[in-house]
């Protein structure tokens, strides 16, 4: 299992995956809005989405786990 983590502090603008989705390395799983810019958060590994730990509008900090892959 691996976590996809926020690489910047901001607000979740869009969640691009749901539990059960298969994602490949480099796929965008969440988009964070920070300083009026949309920053994609990409999966570092491929896998199946086991858990989504964030929701649209939620404030997140750098290093927070956003999605769990298995």
Image (spheres, helix red, strand yellow):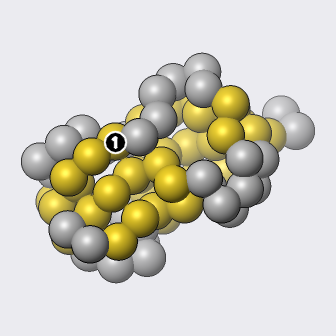
Q: Pick the residue in front: 49 or 37.
A: 49
Query: In which quadrant is the C terminus drawn?
Result: bottom left
Q: What residue is shown at x 65% (from left), y 60% (from top)?
A: 63
Q: Where does residue 9 sit, x and y in percent of width and height?
A: 77, 47
Looking at the image, residue 12 sits to the left or right of residue 26; the answer is right
Residue 54: x, y in percent? 47, 35
Residue 33: image location, x then y, percent: 71, 37
Is 66 left, or right, of 34 in this rendering? left
Tell me the element at label 1.
Answer: strand
Residue 62, picture quadrant: bottom right
Seen in the image, is 39 located left or right of residue 9? left
Residue at point 19% right, 42% down? Answer: 19
Horizontal side of 22 relative to 27 (left or right) equals left
Q: Name the residue under label 1.
A: 52
Q: Position of residue 6 (x, y in %)?
A: 62, 56
Is residue 37 visible to us here? no
**Residue nearest the viewer, comparing 46 with 4:** 4
């Amino acid at each position: 299992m691996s976590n996809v983590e926020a690489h910047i502090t901001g607000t979740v603008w869009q969640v691009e995956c749901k539990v059960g989705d298969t994602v490949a390395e480099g796929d965008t799983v969440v988009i964070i809005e920070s300083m009026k810019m949309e920053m994609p958060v990409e999966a570092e590994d491929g896998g199946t989405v086991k858990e989504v730990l964030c929701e649209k509008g939620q404030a997140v900090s750098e290093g927070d786990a956003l999605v769990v892959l298995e």
